[in-house]
Amino acid sequence: MTRWMDEEAGPVVRPYALIGGRTRSSGDALDLVSMITATGTVPTGGFVPGPEQERILSLVATATSVADIASDLDLPLGVVRVLLGDLHDHKLISIGRASTSERILKEVINGLRAL
């Protein structure tokens, strides 16, 4: 992403330009802990992933949370959701839920109560 930065001016391409000014996509339902994994499918139908989407695909070779993807790309969550929605629409990623055991949830609750 450094090639898109100018030290004095900041980002050369504004985040909304990366997603064509769209603010909604099928990725809107993704929460921060949704786990994203690349399917390994080759893009079809003339879809060509952009540089940020290519980076996402490399990041999600193993399951990665939406929050981690946004952090690694240094992009706002809304932008990442749109990019992920496009990848999901073209079957390039799968979306799963983080597995949380009841024991872990109880420990978190007990920890919060202890505060």
Image (tube, rainbow, N blue to C red):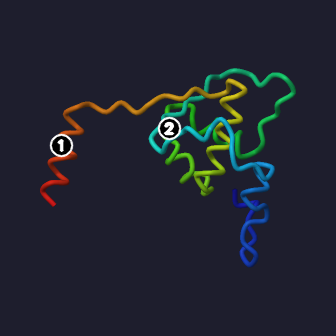
Identify which residue is drawn at 56% across, 38% down.
Answer: 29
Answer with left or right where residue 77 lies relative to residue 41. Answer: left
**Is disc 2 placed on a helix, strand or loop?**
strand
Q: Which mark is residue 83?
A: none
- What residue does disc 2 label? 64
Amino acid type at circle 1 is Glu
- What residue does disc 1 label? 107
**Is disc 1 placed on a helix, strand or loop?**
helix
In-front residue for pair 114/5: 114
Residue 21 spot, x, y in % from top left: 78, 53
Q: Is residue 108 above or below residue 104?
A: below
Quarter occupied by residue 43? top right
Sooner in the amino-acid sequence: mark 2 or mark 1: 2
Amino acid type at circle 2 is Thr
Identify which residue is drawn at 61% across, 52% down.
Answer: 73
Quarter occupied by residue 41? top right
Which residue lies most toward the bottom here? Answer: 8
